């Protein structure tokens, strides 16, 4: 049996998953075809369905099914408290953890990285600026990661916010330096939120 | 953002992959939707295509696209030398490694395991018996894994083959005890084939 044809293409396609190399892809392909064909079909359908239905929230840019994500669409959320994060996974992590956070989000989909061509335009900081200028936001929690680029991004947004007279804070307590917010446990994340300090 | 809807369903569906728990599934879902939508679509299509096109070879029962797999369809292969393996992944591993094996295969899709209700019928040993009785096979290489159940399966097939006057051998050299054939490197596998001994 060669690695060409439908089987080879499946092995190749599985490698688009993060952390999946040729050996794992091979193991996954055989597992699905031999032992879990219904699961394979469900996965294919879930992928197509997600691609079809999931886009960006018009307000905060997180991944969502409707025009507005459940957070932005919820009138109970405190729109004066805006938390800026790098990725939708972080919105998810913060909302899953018992952080007590009741505000809203803005998702950058990245961080400033001039060498990679990622500047304010790529992060849609124009949309964030518009939020700041609406007068609705009182405090911006800068929850970018504690990496060098995450810090630089927080500084940049801090300067923007100050021009509009908006207070900023930075989550800090409990975050390991160089750590990725998405992989921090819920308790640490809760501490990081409660222990946030003026930027 | 909650874990329901299309996103939650995708996370759930990804868990059908071996070795993928809730955290990895979440990371994979976000990665695909945020950074690799074309890859996600390709994966969905490769899954559906594979499900649609890949079945069992009528002769050896390995996974294949046609009625016969490329090995069984190849007139150059030595049909007097039959290698019995547990899974299609092992056919793949043996054919990828430079074992020098030029014979044909029979795939059991498992091993005898009475406690799990896996007996001769489940392994389609009736089909194997028919091959033995055809007079075509001179030697059966028993390449089931070196686990307790794999050994028991080899013994069972050895007894069957002997009744039909067929010589059996067992690959042995270089296989770690309790090891899974699929995960052994090519060189070890080549040695195991060359060093096979009469059962
Ligand atoms: Zn939103
Ligand atoms: Zn075949």
Image: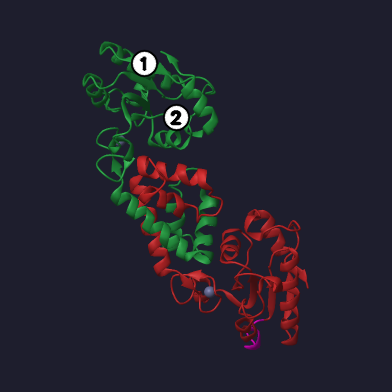
Chain colours: A red, B green
Return the x and y of residue B159 as percentages of the image width and height: 32, 12
Between A69 and B191, the residue placed more toward the observer is B191
The reply to whether the C-beta atoms of the residues labelled 2 and 1 are less than 8 Å apart is: no
Residue bearing mark 2: B100
Discs 2 and 1 carry the same chain letter: yes
Image: B16 above or below B62: below
Pair 2/1: label in front = 2
Q: Does the segment drawn in magenta span residue B43? A: no
Majority secondary structure of magenta residues? loop
Residue bearing mark 1: B168
| Quadrant of the rendered image containing residue B100 | top left
Q: What kind of element bears circle 2?
A: loop
| Magenta-highlighted residues | A132-137
Question: Image point 49% across, 72% down: which residue?
Answer: A69
Return the x and y of residue B46 as percentages of the image width and height: 38, 55
Between B121 and A184, the residue placed more toward the observer is B121
Image: B169 above or below A32: above
Q: Does the segment drawn in magenta span residue A135? A: yes
Looking at this rendering, what residue extends furthest in the front direction? B76
Q: Is residue A76 left or right of residue A83?
A: left
Can you see residue B4?
A: no
Question: Image point 46% across, 38% down: which residue?
Answer: B96
């Amino acid at each position: 049996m060669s690695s060409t044809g439908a089987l080879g293409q499946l092995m190749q396609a599985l490698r688009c998953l993060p952390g999946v190399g040729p050996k794992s892809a091979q193991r996954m392909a055989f597992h699905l075809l031999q032992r879990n064909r219904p699961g394979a079909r469900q996965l294919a359908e879930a992928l197509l369905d997600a691609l079809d239905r999931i886009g960006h929230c018009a307000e905060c840019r997180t991944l969502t099914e409707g025009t507005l994500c459940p957070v932005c669409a919820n009138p109970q959320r405190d729109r004066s408290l805006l938390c800026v994060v790098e990725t939708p996974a972080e919105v998810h992590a913060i909302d899953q953890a018992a952080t007590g956070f009741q505000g809203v989000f803005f998702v950058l989909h990245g961080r400033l990285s001039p060498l990679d061509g990622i500047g304010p335009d790529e992060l849609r900081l124009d949309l964030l600026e518009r939020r700041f200028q609406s007068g609705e936001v009182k405090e911006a929690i800068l929850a970018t990661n504690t990496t060098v680029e995450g810090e630089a991004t927080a500084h940049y947004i801090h300067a923007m916010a100050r021009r509009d007279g908006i207070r900023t804070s930075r989550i800090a307590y409990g975050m390991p330096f160089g750590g990725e917010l998405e992989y921090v446990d819920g308790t640490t994340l809760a501490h990081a939120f409660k222990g946030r300090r003026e930027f």
